[in-house]
């Protein structure tokens, strides 16, 4: 039995390596670069705390006498502070490692919640139609009439700062994209002959949706989810920069940019520039990978 499972897994891997998807991937330099950037960011976020020179949020490990030290390669730099320090004497390199874990987690969890809610509502609206469809789509239309950032700012201003509240805000602004996309594809899929045949033999609607409709819209969901992670990382950074996102006691790349921005024009550029560059690299990598997935998984673009 174990040998059979091993053989099946091995054959699955061989099929993937021989697939058209993998062939296009290994010949697509931007996709490979994006994958490398995303992989590095994920490894740093998950394992970075084990090799970070300092815990920048442990008061016993920071010293105000080390505040605003420049990067180690500049005059005045100090060994042990590769990218310099901020106003509190925190190592910028270590702060980026801790902040990236928080920002990527928020992006992934926010995307997951948005995906589940939006996909569910899109499937319901597209499959059942009628008043349910009209209600869900009118709510989506009303929400789309306002900028997403404005909605997130309003939610955070009303409920206050906090990671949980930030995730709620991201979910509130993110579900609409999934709902509209999935609804549109569901309207087409439910007219297919195999779906009509499933209805004819009396299969329950939930089985038809899960086994016949959802698998045919999952490609678009994957593309949306990939791109939305980067979008949510930027949104979190923006809200934290504006002072309504992650609390100041929690690690966040947006907060690092904010605290460094206050002294950016005083010549202490490293406190803001390095966290900002890291955000840019993460989002750049995600977008490169997302563009490849969009081109490969969307049959309308082939």
Image (cartoon, rainbow, N blue to C red):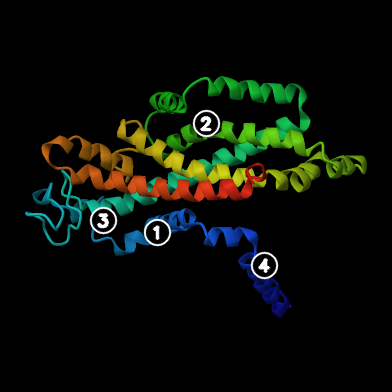
Q: Could you tell me how many numbered marks the image carries?
A: 4
Residue 199 is left or right of residue 171, and the answer is right
Does residue 263 appear in this view?
no
**Among the two numbered marks 3 and 4 on one chain, the one whose residue lies closer to the N terminus:** 4
Residue beneath disc 1: 40
**Among the two numbered marks 2 and 4 on one chain, the one whose residue lies closer to the N terminus:** 4
Q: Do the residues labelled 3 and 4 touch (CB within 8 Å)?
A: no
Residue beneath disc 2: 172
Residue beneath disc 3: 55
On the image, the x and y values in percent for residue 44 come to 37, 58
Residue beneath disc 4: 15
On the image, the x and y values in percent for residue 229 come to 48, 44
| Gap between marks 1 and 3 measured at Cα | 20 Å
**Among the two numbered marks 1 and 2 on one chain, the one whose residue lies closer to the N terminus:** 1
**Among the two numbered marks 1 and 4 on one chain, the one whose residue lies closer to the N terminus:** 4
Mark 1 or 2, closer to the camera: 1
| Gap between marks 1 and 2 measured at Cα | 29 Å
On the image, the x and y values in percent for residue 168 come to 49, 34
């Amino acid at each position: 039995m174990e040998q059979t499972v091993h053989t099946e897994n091995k054959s699955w891997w061989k099929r993937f390596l021989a697939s058209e998807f993998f062939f296009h991937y290994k010949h697509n330099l931007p996709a490979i670069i994006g994958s490398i950037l995303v992989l590095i960011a994920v490894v740093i976020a998950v394992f970075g705390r084990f090799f970070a020179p300092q815990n920048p949020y442990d008061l016993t490990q920071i010293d105000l006498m080390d505040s605003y030290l420049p990067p180690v390669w500049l005059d005045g730099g100090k060994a042990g502070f590769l990218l310099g320090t901020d106003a509190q004497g925190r190592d910028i390199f270590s702060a980026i490692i801790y902040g990236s874990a928080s920002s990527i987690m928020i992006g992934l969890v926010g995307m997951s919640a948005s995906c589940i809610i939006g996909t569910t509502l899109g499937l319901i609206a597209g499959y059942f139609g009628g008043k349910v469809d009209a209600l869900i789509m009118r709510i989506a239309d009303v929400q789309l009439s306002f900028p997403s950032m404005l909605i997130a700012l309003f939610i955070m201003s009303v409920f206050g700062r906090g990671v949980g509240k930030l995730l709620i805000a991201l979910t509130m602004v993110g579900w609409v994209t999934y709902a509209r996309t999935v609804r549109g594809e569901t309207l087409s899929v439910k007219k297919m002959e195999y779906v009509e045949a499933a209805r004819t033999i009396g299969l329950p609607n939930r089985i038809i949706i899960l086994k016949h409709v959802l698998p045919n819209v999952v490609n678009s969901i994957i593309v949306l989810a990939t791109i939305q992670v980067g979008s949510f990382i930027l949104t979190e950074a923006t809200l934290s920069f504006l002072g309504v996102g992650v609390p100041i006691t929690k690690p966040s790349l947006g907060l690092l940019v904010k605290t460094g921005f206050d002294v950016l024009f005083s010549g202490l550029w490293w406190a803001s520039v390095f966290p900002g560059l890291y955000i840019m690299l993460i989002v750049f990598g995600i977008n490169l990978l997302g563009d490849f997935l969009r081109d490969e998984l969307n049959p309308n673009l082939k």
